[in-house]
Amino acid sequence: MKGDILAVKHYSWMGSRIRKATNCDYNHVAMFIDDEWIVEATFAGVKKTNIDDYIKRQKQNKLSLSIFRINDLTEKQLNLMCLFLEDQIGTKYDFIQLIVLWVFLVLGISRRLEPIDNSHKWICSELIAESAYNAGIRFSEKVDPDCTSPADILYSKKVKKL
């Protein structure tokens, strides 16, 4: 459903490292912009992906999926988030931010402020958090949206697992 968050657990070396660093059951997040399409930040950049691609990989036991919903999301907020996400399609992945986030998490450094802002480059959780922030939603008051991990989104009181 539009606005729902797709949480992904990839059964890969990189996926397990991200889950361990973020202390989360999932290593990737994306958002539905309608019933069939999600927008996500991948190593290849921000793209629109058909959910059938993920369902096929889940059936091949390459990953597992869960769906989360933002509580009390208004139609206006939903539309702002989806417009923001669609505007980011084609932008690059932020490898520097991935490294910075990993270092901050491993060393326990506060993520209240982001030290580096690579505008128009994204990691998956940063993209989703920034789209929500654009619509007036913060998953955590203790974490800058640009320094958000999948755990900050999925374990927030602002979302529920379906």
Image (cartoon, rainbow, N blue to C red):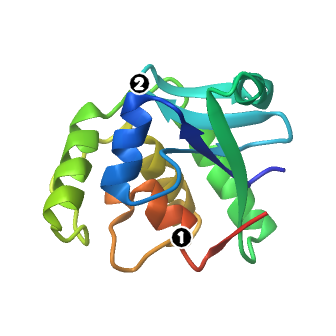
Which residue lies at the image location 70% right of the left edge and 51% below the top edge? 66
Q: Position of residue 29 (x, y in %)?
A: 56, 46
Secondary structure state at the residue bearing disc 2: loop
Q: Are marks 1 and 2 in contact (CB under 8 Å)?
A: no
Instruction: Give x and y (percent) for residue 137.
Output: 56, 72
Type of amino acid under label 2: Phe
User: As displayed, is residue 42 above or below residue 138?
Assistant: above
Quarter of the picture containing the C terminus is bottom right
Q: Is residue 5 visible?
A: yes
Question: Left or right: 62 with respect to 155?
Answer: right
Q: CA distance from mark 1 to mark 2?
A: 24 Å
Disc ID at residue 122: none
Count of numbered tags:
2
Element at badge 1?
Answer: loop
Give the vertical position of 21 relative to 51 (above or below): below
Q: Which residue is labeled 1 in the image?
A: 155
**What amino acid does circle 1 point to?**
Tyr
Q: Which residue in the protein does label 2 denote? A: 43
Residue depicted at 26% across the width and 43% down the height: 97
Label 2 crowd bin: few (<14), some (14–19), many (20+), radius 10 Å: few
| Residue appearing at x 69%, y 37% in the figure | 38
Image location of residue 52, percent across then percent down: 80, 25
